[in-house]
Image (cartoon, rainbow, N blue to C red):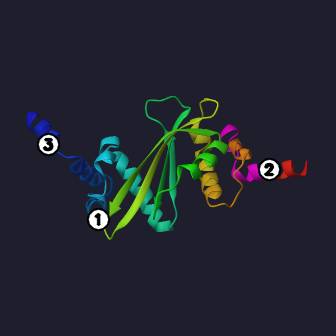
């Protein structure tokens, strides 16, 4: 038992990442992902996130490459009330500007409490930026993430890509669990009234 504890204490963050990837994806895929990502996470990233949290980021980064577009995830902030959320945005090619993200989040009924970015350095000079936002509902009201998470992420993507307007009607996604299409209908009605 003591030997196991000593062995566990001697393992580095990268060792734990290797184990986590191996457990999650199996030997072949785990090794392949470790070869690609094992050296890519900075010390700052390693201090903020566990290897198991890195697996979620690796999965999102893989989607960035697969779909050639940014990815985002939304979850509750650990140890906080249900009005505090964590938004992560993953983008290849260069960082995104906070001044571009703020209006979108504000119009979707959130305010940004903090943001920190990390660069994930991959082989072949590929870089992916992970933007980690701590956000809170505008009024401080708790939200049920399961009710609007999918609608939020879809709406955020469309707003970001300028396929729908970035205005206050988008807060209906969070406040009323509307889909972006329902916001679009209300927006259209409002224009004609």
In 3D space, how far apart are the residues under numbered discs 3 and 1 (Cα atoms)?
Answer: 24 Å
Magenta stretch, residue numbers? 173-187
2 or 1: tag closer to the N-terminus: 1
Q: Determine the residue positioned at 60% across, 56% down.
A: 157
Q: Residues within 10 Å of mark 1 (few under 14, many from 20)?
A: some
- In front: label 3 or label 1: 3
- The stretch drawn in magenta includes residue 174: yes
SS for dot 2: helix
Tell me residue 113's x, y (percent): 52, 36
Residue underneath mark 1: 32
| Relative side of 149 to 15, left or right | right
Q: Nearer the viewer, residue 190 or 100?
A: 100
3 or 1: tag closer to the N-terminus: 3
Residue underneath mark 3: 10
- In front: label 2 or label 1: 2
- The stretch drawn in magenta includes residue 85: no
2 or 3: tag closer to the N-terminus: 3
Tell me residue 176's x, y (percent): 71, 39
In 3D space, how far apart are the residues under numbered discs 2 and 1 (Cα atoms)?
Answer: 47 Å
Q: Is residue 51 visible?
A: no
Residue underneath mark 2: 187
The answer to whether residue 68 is above or below residue 136 is below
Q: Is residue 180 visible?
A: yes
SS for dot 3: helix
| Relative side of 50 to 180, left or right | left
């Amino acid at each position: 038992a003591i030997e196991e504890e000593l062995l566990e204490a001697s393992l580095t963050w990268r060792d734990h990442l290797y184990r986590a990837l191996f457990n999650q994806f199996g030997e072949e895929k785990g090794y392949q992902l470790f070869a690609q990502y094992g050296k890519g996470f900075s010390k700052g990233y390693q201090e903020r996130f566990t290897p198991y949290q890195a697996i979620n980021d690796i999965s999102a980064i893989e989607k960035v490459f697969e779909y050639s577009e940014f990815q985002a995830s939304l979850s509750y902030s650990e140890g906080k009330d249900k009005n505090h959320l964590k938004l992560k945005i993953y983008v290849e090619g260069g960082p995104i500007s906070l001044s571009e993200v703020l209006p979108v989040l504000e119009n979707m009924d959130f305010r940004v409490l903090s943001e920190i970015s990390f660069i994930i350095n991959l082989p072949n000079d590929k870089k992916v930026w992970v933007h980690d936002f701590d956000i809170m509902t505008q009024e401080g009201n708790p939200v049920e993430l399961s009710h609007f998470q999918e609608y939020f992420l879809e709406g955020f993507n469309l707003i970001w890509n300028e396929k729908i307007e970035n205005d206050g009607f988008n807060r209906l996604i969070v406040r009323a669990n509307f889909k972006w299409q329902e916001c679009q209908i209300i927006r259209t009605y409002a224009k004609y009234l």
